[in-house]
Image (tube, helix red, strand yellow):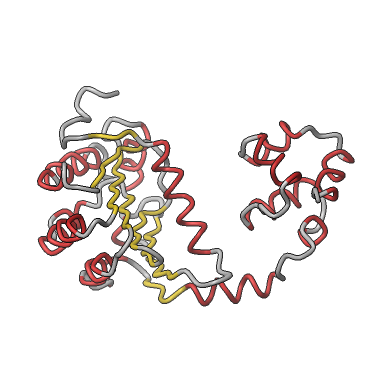
Amino acid sequence: MANERLRGAIVDLGLTLDEVAQRLGVASKTVERWINEPERKPYRRFQYATASLLKCEVSYLWPDERTSAEVTASGNAELLRLYPHRSVVMQTLWTDLYSKARRQFDVLVYSGFWLTEDATFHRIVKEKSAEGVSIRFMMGEPTSPAVAVRGDDEGIGAAMAAKIRNALVNYGPLFGLPGVEFRLHNTTLYNSIYRADDEMLANGHIYGVGAYMAPVLHLRRVPGGELFDAYAESVERVWESARPISSPTEWEGVH
């Protein structure tokens, strides 16, 4: 049965599906599925955004949804630890995280240069590649406006692009390994995200401060939780929009 409450709320405000989709930042077909395939519910953040747009309660549009208290409790369960800034996190936490990967692991950064100099990390990538684990690196496009802005925000200017180039060179031996893929993105990155299966470290970005001084969330997915999935969804969006490269110098000449 279709979600007639959602359809009616849209009609009552005189909106079209295209207008709702545009304001929410999703495709029109996505909104149509929310109506015609109610079992495919939107992510919680889209439920709140939709309810706000249509001036309704979330519980009215999706009556069987959990209470805010339940969502908060699940989120607290997902947070294993909060570090005030990355520099206090033991280096072995990253390598321990990736060493446990059995299905996939992701690295979403602008440069993540410090990780490229870790010999243990390089060894883990090679071992996981041999085990058939899917490994995805998402680095900043050195010539992109987003990288230039981030460099200015951190007060290092063009050094940000240089760090990315150097990081790619350091990763040179990893190019071409089975299951290892590199892509360059030009997104505004609000977090550097390091994911292994159902566990991740999310390093926030703060204006005027290098990532090493920004907080790190250590998260683990739990049934009913939404915090981990919100970050994981952002990784997928960056991956889909990023440009595949097959060598450390493939960015050259791209503007």
If the image is split into quadrants, where does the C terminus sit? Answer: top left
Residue 36: name its quadrant: top right
Q: Residue furthest right?
A: 12
Q: Is residue 91 visible?
A: yes
Q: Position of residue 87 (x, y in %)?
A: 26, 67
**Relative to residue 222, is residue 191 drawn left or right?**
left
Is 13 left, or right, of 112 in this rendering? right
Where does the image place residue 26, in percent across and percent down from the top left? Answer: 61, 39
Task: Locate residue 133, reporting x and y percent.
Answer: 27, 57
Say which quarter of the image contains residue 119.
bottom left
Is any part of residue 114 visible from this angle?
Answer: no
Examine the rendered structure and indicate whether residue 69 appears above or below residue 227. below
Question: Horizontally, is 236 left or right of 168 in the view?
Answer: right
What residue lies at 20% left-to-right and 51% top-to-bottom? Answer: 113
**Residue sitting at 68 percent across and 75 percent down?**
69
Figure disc tally: 0
Residues 245 and 3: in front is: 3
Q: Residue at x 23, y 68 (%)?
A: 99
Q: Which of 88 and 29 lies nearest the eye of the viewer?
A: 29
Image coordinates of residue 179 in percent, x first then y, are: 24, 48
Please name the residue shown 61% across and 55% down the image.
Answer: 43
Instruction: Name the foreground residue: 142 vs 173.
Output: 173
